[in-house]
């Protein structure tokens, strides 16, 4: 694998500064500069609109096409510092797609079956809590958010302040999750409807830990980072790594709590933009069978909305899009890949609002559409 930095540019866009930090090449290929200039123009324009028309003040981008990863950084953080390739961002629920790769590995290894009841792999859980009128929750149900489980089994009080919610999240560890689940009564039949569930993905994580007899952090290193090439994606920080992490801000002005130590299978990874570029490239440029398996449609429709291994899908027969959002106390993120076209994009901002992920989604979609038309 060869990396060559060949693009550095600085430009004033309204009241914020844009930094194109680097371009690194997989396989030592060099893009046509006309195409590269068009890419820069499109991303500058669309991220410029995003910052000019919202309260978002800083955005970082990884863009992948034909084996080339480009990273871009715009604006300023709330403390006046600038984003860069060195910054560690929360990626929130994009963590789930990483866990999807481990699940795909376990299916390939014959350790777990998608249509088997999840209770088969969770010895500590009351089987009755994982069924409704005789229909049991399967691994597939959990991986595609149609299990009937709620978003969370705890810490969902509307009036909790951020610090209170974080304290609750930390106390609501996997052992606590299983204890609550053992007294839980499922309210609907599994497989009937989509209902996003952090709890469901955490159960997948617990099952994978038991199957491989290793914590999820080790499984990420063994079955994900080893193959994606990610070298700056972390579940937990050293002190030097923590110094590079950006906490972010919330639109309501309340201080965001320090959730840097919070991690489970449903969320909590932190990563740099170049490392997320490596993650994108793994799906777009690898012939690894696990990457291909992880993108298999598990629920929904080819010509509409669906789900793969904890990826969302959109019109796989035409648009060919896989996507996921990520949100934490102080960060919003978005990732999309288009394997047939070898295109991928990741956007992240240290800012949270009710609409921030949607705004990143729209910006990402527009960039891809304009790039297709170049």
Image: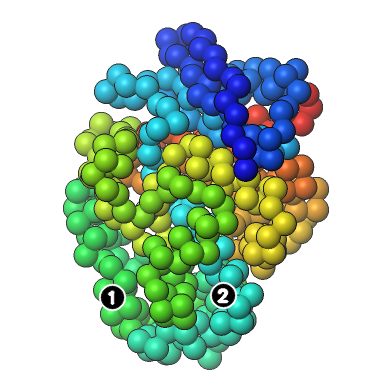
Q: Residue at x 77, y 47 (%)?
A: 340
In the image: residue 3, left or right of residue 86: right
State the CA–CA distance, disc 2 to disc 1: 22 Å
Q: Residue at x 76, y 42 (%)?
A: 341
Residue 34 placement (x, y as % from top left): 75, 18
Give the position of the C terminus as an image quadrant: top right
Quadrant in the picture for residue 192? bottom right
Quadrant in the picture for residue 307? bottom right
Which sits in the foreground, 265 or 9? Answer: 9
Vertical side of 161 occupied by 155: above or below: below
Residue 268 placement (x, y as % from top left): 37, 53
Does the image show residue 180? no
Which sits in the foreground, 54 or 341? Answer: 341
Residue 175 placement (x, y as % from top left): 28, 75
Q: Which mark is residue 175?
A: 1
Q: Which mark is residue 106?
A: 2
């Amino acid at each position: 694998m060869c990396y060559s930095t060949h693009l550095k540019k600085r430009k004033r866009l309204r009241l914020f500064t844009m930094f194109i930090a680097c371009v690194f090449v997989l396989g030592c290929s060099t893009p046509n500069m006309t195409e590269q200039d068009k890419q820069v123009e499109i991303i500058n324009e669309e991220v410029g609109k995003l910052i000019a028309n919202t309260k978002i003040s800083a955005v970082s981008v990884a863009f992948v096409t034909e084996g080339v990863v480009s990273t871009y950084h715009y604006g300023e953080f709330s403390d006046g510092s600038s984003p860069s390739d060195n910054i560690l961002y929360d990626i929130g629920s994009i963590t789930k797609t990483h866990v999807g790769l481990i699940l795909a590995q376990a299916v390939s290894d014959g350790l777990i079956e998608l249509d088997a009841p999840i209770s088969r792999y969770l010895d500590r859980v009351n089987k009755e809590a994982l069924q409704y009128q005789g229909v049991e929750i399967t691994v597939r149900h959990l991986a595609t958010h149609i299990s009937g489980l709620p978003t969370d089994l705890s810490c969902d009080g509307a009036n909790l302040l951020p610090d209170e919610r974080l304290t609750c999240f930390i106390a609501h560890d996997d052992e606590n999750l299983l204890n609550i689940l053992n007294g839980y009564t499922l309210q609907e039949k599994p497989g009937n409807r989509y209902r996003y569930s952090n709890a469901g993905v955490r159960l997948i994580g617990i099952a994978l830990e038991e199957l491989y007899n290793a914590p999820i952090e080790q499984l990420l290193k063994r079955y994900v980072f080893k193959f994606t090439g990610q070298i700056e994606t972390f579940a937990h920080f050293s002190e030097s790594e923590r110094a590079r992490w950006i906490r972010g801000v919330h639109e309501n002005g309340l201080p965001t709590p320090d959730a840097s130590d919070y991690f489970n299978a449903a969320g909590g990874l932190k990563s740099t933009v170049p490392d997320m570029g490596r993650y994108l490239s793994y799906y777009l440029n690898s012939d690894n069978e696990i990457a291909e398996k992880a993108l298999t449609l598990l629920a929904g429709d080819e010509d509409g909305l669906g789900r793969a291994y904890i990826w969302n899908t959109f019109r796989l027969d035409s648009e060919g899009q896989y996507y996921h959002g990520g949100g934490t106390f102080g960060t919003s993120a978005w990732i999309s890949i288009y394997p047939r076209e070898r295109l991928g994009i990741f956007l992240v901002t240290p800012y949270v609002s009710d609409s921030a992920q949607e705004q990143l989604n729209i910006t990402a979609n527009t960039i891809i559409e304009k790039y297709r038309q170049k």
